[in-house]
Structure formats: structure tokens, C-alpha cells
Image (cartoon, helix red, strand yellow):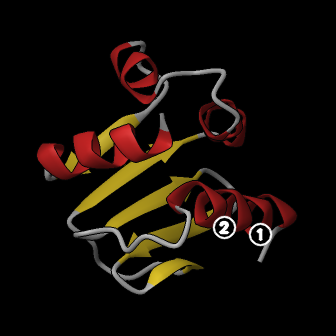
């Protein structure tokens, strides 16, 4: 597991604040690996989920640090979404 994925798992766990995520989502960080968020928490994993969000490491870092709104990243072509758009919106509200 890359340092970027490890740090992202920590940051996402902190953002969730111990709350379970109702559904499942996967972040694919290009060239680094994947992170799954679901009712069991946050972990480095590549299993099937309701929605997959894909972007480069810089974009994910900006989203996690609050410098970039996930919706703006999607609209600007920096973040792609495959699957349940409603689940992506729910995750976006957790990250904001």
C-alpha cells in the first residue's frame, strides 16, 4: 500500500468521525491504489462498490484537505464517477 493511500485512509476515517457510511464507495487513486468506504469503515481495498470515484493523487488530496469541492472536481473533469450518482452525492456531503 502506498503512502498516499495510507494517508487517505487515515484522513477519510477522521472525516467520518466514527460514523458508518450507509452504502459503499471506492476511491481509485490513479497509479496508487484504491480505498473503500462502507458500513465497516475505511480501508485500502479494491472490492466492488455502489460507486467508484477516480482521480489523480493531487485531486484527491485537494478534496480531502477541503481545498477542492468534490462536485467542482467532477464538473471540471478532474474526478470521474462510475455507478450510483446518489451515493456519490452522499459521499460528497461527508467530504465537504
Reply above or below: 96 against 73. below
Q: Name the residue furthest right.
A: 3
| Distance Cα–Cα, label 2 vs label 1 | 5 Å
Bin the neighbour count of mark 1 within 10 Å (Cα to Cα): few under 14, some 14-19, many 20 and up: some
Residue bearing mark 1: 6
Q: Residue 44: horizontal and vertical position, in percent?
A: 60, 78
Which residue is depicted at the point 49% across and 22% down?
Answer: 69
Please identify the quadrant where the N terminus is shown. bottom right
Q: Residues within 10 Å of mark 2 (few under 14, many from 20)?
A: many
The quarter holding residue 10 reads: bottom right
Horizontally, residue 1 falls left or right of residue 19, namely: right
Q: Residue 18, relative to residue 78: is it above or below? A: below
Asked which quadrant contains residue 57, the reply is top right
* Image location (x, y in percent) of residue 83: 17, 53
Q: Which residue is mark 2?
A: 9
The image shows residue 21, relative to residue 79, as above or below, that is below
Left or right, residue 52 beside residue 22: right
At which x and y percent is residue 6? 77, 69
- Give the residue furthest to the bottom: 40
Task: Kindly identify the residue that appears in the image at 20 percent across and 52 percent down.
Answer: 87
Above or below, 93 relative to 22: above
Q: Which mark is residue 71?
A: none
**Mark 2 near mark 1, Cβ–Cβ under 8 Å?**
yes
Q: Residue at x 58, y 54 (%)?
A: 15
Per the image, label 2 sits on a secondary structure element best described as: helix
Looking at the image, which is closer to me, 3 or 20? 20
Q: Secondary structure at mark 1?
A: helix
Amino acid at each position: 500500500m502506498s503512502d498516499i493511500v495510507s494517508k487517505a485512509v487515515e484522513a477519510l476515517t477522521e472525516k467520518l468521525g466514527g460514523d458508518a457510511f450507509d452504502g459503499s464507495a471506492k476511491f481509485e487513486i490513479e497509479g496508487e491504489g484504491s480505498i473503500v468506504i462502507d458500513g465497516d469503515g475505511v480501508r485500502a481495498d479494491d472490492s466492488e462498490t455502489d460507486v467508484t470515484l477516480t482521480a489523480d493523487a493531487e485531486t484527491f488530496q485537494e478534496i480531502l484537505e477541503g481545498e477542492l469541492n468534490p462536485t467542482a472536481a467532477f464538473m471540471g473533469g478532474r474526478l470521474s464517477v462510475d455507478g450510483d450518482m446518489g451515493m456519490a452525492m452522499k459521499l460528497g456531503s461527508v467530504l465537504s
